[in-house]
């Protein structure tokens, strides 16, 4: 549903902002969550964790014109999904079932050949690190409300996504640059199935979701709805117009899972504190290359195997497995030892102008830096 709101939206959202608890008052976390809503985001959930415990803040509304969102609400995690895929691969490496330097051709013979591609030269490491040179030009994006209504229920297999991407010439040869590729992660998903005989999401459930006892994290498959409590996701394609983009079928290895603040916080800390990865595999995960072209939003950002890092405003670096999926933005940060973390879910994408994109991103960055620099 499209709604023309303009100035009224800011008044509605500000009125719905609520503190985390009576004794916490307007904590820094709460003020920063309110600051994100002030940019035009409809709803914000935020959670910080340290050795002293956890704190949660919510701001805005669950649905336009409605009440505040629930702190236990579910949301689409978008490309935060990539660190789940990377973790599964690294566990398989630790078990000796595959290697990071295995070629695509070894596990998917004949799939990546021709049009400038050679699967013998593209490795698992290249794919996880976005250095494979796999074009993302045909990845099915949604850029306006009409496209959303036309495409929201389309079902695409990972093979279809990969074959569509390979119809474009590679932007560079393997190892010759850095270019974010959702299509490349669909290839990783197919390789996991070739190695294990199970889908990548079955392996995520078996290796991450169940061992961590996550009750609210799940793979939706072809179901376009979000089950359980959740805020509606909105996208502002045009200034002043909010399109309800909650429903979507877009569940593949590049960004498919649904989770909550508490569950996602547990995941990102478990990856870095040794519960999910051995030291040798964690070193591989955090071996990085420069993320070219991202300085406009993240300072000196680098990318490992499914996870990025950036400089904090106070100095030092933080790990940032984050992602977008239509209607939702997820931003996380975790310390290298997994003892400090912050997870932010925003149930709006402000895509109507670069100024709006940067305002939302900068407000989320401020929240994260205020937590991680404390």
Image (tube, grey):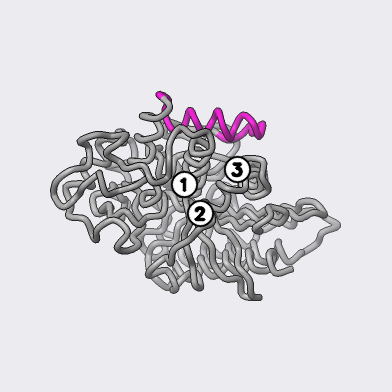
Quadrant of image for the C terminus: bottom right
Q: Is the residue 196 above or below the residue 128 in the image?
A: above
Q: Are marks 1 and 2 in contact (CB under 8 Å)?
A: yes
Q: Position of residue 139 (x, y in %)?
A: 28, 48
Residue 294: in magenta span = no
Is residue 259 visible in this depiction of the protein? yes
Residue at 29%, 63% in the rendered image: 176
- The disc at residue 82 is 1
Indicate which label's residue lies in the foreground, 3 or 1. Answer: 3
Q: Which residue is mark 3?
A: 277
* Residue that protrudes farthest toward the left in the picture: 115
Q: Which residue is mark 2?
A: 307
Q: From the viewer's perspective, is 298 left or right of 134?
A: right
* Residue 16 seen anywhere in this rendered image of the structure: no
Q: Earlier in the sequence, mark 1 or mark 2?
A: 1
| Residue 241 place in picture, x, y as percent | 40, 59
Which SS class for mark 3? loop
């Amino acid at each position: 549903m499209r709604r023309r709101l303009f100035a009224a939206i800011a008044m509605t959202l500000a009125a719905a902002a609520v503190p985390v608890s009576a004794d916490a008052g307007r904590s820094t976390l709460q003020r920063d969550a309110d600051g994100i809503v002030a940019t035009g985001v409809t709803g914000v959930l935020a959670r910080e964790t340290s050795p002293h415990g956890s704190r949660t803040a919510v701001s805005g509304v669950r649905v336009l014109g409605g009440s505040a969102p629930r702190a236990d609400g579910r949301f689409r995690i978008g490309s935060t999904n990539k660190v789940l895929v990377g973790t599964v691969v690294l566990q398989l490496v630790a078990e000796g079932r595959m290697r990071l330097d295995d070629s695509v051709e070894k596990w998917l013979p004949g799939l990546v050949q021709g049009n400038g591609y050679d699967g013998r030269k593209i490795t698992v490491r290249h794919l996880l690190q976005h250095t494979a040179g796999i074009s993302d030009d045909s990845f099915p994006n949604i850029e306006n409300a009409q496209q959303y209504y036309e495409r929201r229920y389309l079902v695409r297999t990972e093979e279809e996504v990969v074959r569509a991407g390979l119809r474009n010439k590679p932007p560079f040869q393997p190892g010759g640059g850095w270019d974010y590729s959702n299509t490349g992660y669909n290839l990783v998903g197919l390789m996991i199935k070739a190695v294990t005989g199970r889908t990548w999401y079955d392996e995520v459930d078996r290796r991450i979701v169940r061992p961590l006892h996550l009750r609210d994290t799940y793979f939706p498959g072809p179901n376009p709805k979000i089950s359980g409590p959740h805020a509606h996701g909105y996208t502002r394609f045009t200034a002043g117009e909010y399109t309800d983009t909650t429903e979507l079928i877009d569940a593949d290895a590049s960004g498919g899972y649904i989770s909550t603040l508490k569950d996602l916080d547990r995941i990102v800390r478990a990856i870095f504190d040794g519960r999910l990865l051995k030291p040798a595999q964690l070193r591989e995960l955090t071996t990085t290359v420069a993320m070219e072209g991202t300085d406009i939003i993240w300072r000196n950002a680098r990318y490992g195997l499914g996870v990025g890092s950036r400089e904090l405003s106070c100095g030092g670096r933080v790990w940032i497995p984050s992602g977008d999926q239509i209607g939702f933005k997820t931003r996380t940060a975790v310390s290298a030892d997994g003892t400090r973390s912050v997870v932010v879910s925003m149930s709006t994408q402000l895509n109507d102008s670069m100024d709006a994109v940067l305002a939302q991103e900068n407000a989320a960055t401020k929240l994260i830096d205020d937590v991680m620099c404390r």
